[in-house]
Image (cartoon, helix red, strand yellow):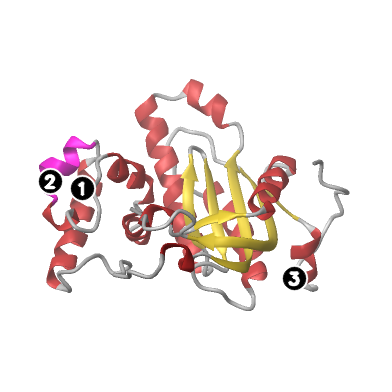
């Protein structure tokens, strides 16, 4: 299912990845979807039209699978590898209060706009949105593709995301604010179970946990990093020392 999630992210519709997964819609059946199918799983009209257009484009290219899919039969655990990864956690400020003030459908539209913004900004910076966690997002810089400046691009993406999310047109809803945590370290990334595309980009290691704790420490509209990331950044940014990270 990860290949479908990646494809939806490229369309700016990553918020629907969970619905596709819940209905077992994978690369082998995505070309068979109709407007009625998409409506049945709760996708609004405008987004259905966008999806149907993208599905037609798939049908006009290779019949095998969406562009991100690969056909590989390597040994299950050979695809998991040890590498350095920069991990970003984002979280909406006061999302609980927002949910009590808004109709669920209005809240869904806001979260969808936020997720689309995350996908656009992070992808443009060379990152990969691994999953959405309610009002948060988990992103990797350094997997699936590694770059020399992954840590720098992660921080630039975090700062750009804070600015972009604050400018979203949300109608009568208040502007959104983020907390972002970024950590860099060694992880094991890949298919950790074997033979399941849904686990192709799972990560094991302390780095994601550290990024989550850093996010919890961040002030609204701030990016918090740890020492390992800081050493990779050089003098590109201004920093404030927040002290030791609570265990």
Residue 164 percent location from the top left of the image: 53, 54
Compute the Cα span from label 1 to label 2: 6 Å
Q: Is residue 194 magenta?
A: no
Q: Which residue is mark 1?
A: 48
Residue 231 percent location from the top left of the image: 80, 69
Q: Is residue 114 above or below residue 231?
A: above
Which residue is painted at 64% across and 58% down in the image?
159
Which residue is painted at 41% across and 67% down in the image?
75
Magenta region's main secondary structure?
A: helix
Which numbered dot is residue 233? Answer: 3
Could you tell me if the residues under marks 1 and 2 are in contact, i.e. CB atoms within 8 Å?
yes
Q: Is residue 59 above or below residue 100?
A: below
State which quadrant residue 87 falls in. bottom right
Compute the Cα span from label 3 to label 1: 41 Å
Rendered-image quadrant of the C terminus:
top right
Residue range corresponding to the magenta coloring: 33-41
Of residue 167 and residue 183, the one placed in the foreground of this image is 183
């Amino acid at each position: 299912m990860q290949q479908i999630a990646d494809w939806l992210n490229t369309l700016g519709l990553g918020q629907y990845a969970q619905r596709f997964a819940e209905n077992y819609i994978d690369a082998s059946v995505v070309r068979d979807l109709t407007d009625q199918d998409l409506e049945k799983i709760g996708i609004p009209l405008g987004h259905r039209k966008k999806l149907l257009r993208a599905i037609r484009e798939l049908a006009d290219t290779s019949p095998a699978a969406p562009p991100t899919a690969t056909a590989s039969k390597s040994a299950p655990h050979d695809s998991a590898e040890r590498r350095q990864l920069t991990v970003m956690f984002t979280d909406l400020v006061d999302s609980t209060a927002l949910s009590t003030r808004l109709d669920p459908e209005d809240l869904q539209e806001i979260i969808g706009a936020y997720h689309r913004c995350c996908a656009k900004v992070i992808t443009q910076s060379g990152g990969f949105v691994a999953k959405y966690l309610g009002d948060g997002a988990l992103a990797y810089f350094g997997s699936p593709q590694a770059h020399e400046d992954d840590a720098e691009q992660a921080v630039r993406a975090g700062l750009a995301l804070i600015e972009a999310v604050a400018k979203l047109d949300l109608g009568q809803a208040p502007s959104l604010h983020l907390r972002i945590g970024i950590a860099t370290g060694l992880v094991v990334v890949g298919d950790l179970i074997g033979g399941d595309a849904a686990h192709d980009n799972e990560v094991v290691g302390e780095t994601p946990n550290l990024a989550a704790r850093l996010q919890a420490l961040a002030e609204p509209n701030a990016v918090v990093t740890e020492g390992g990331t800081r050493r990779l950044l050089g003098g590109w940014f201004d920093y404030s020392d927040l002290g030791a990270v609570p265990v």
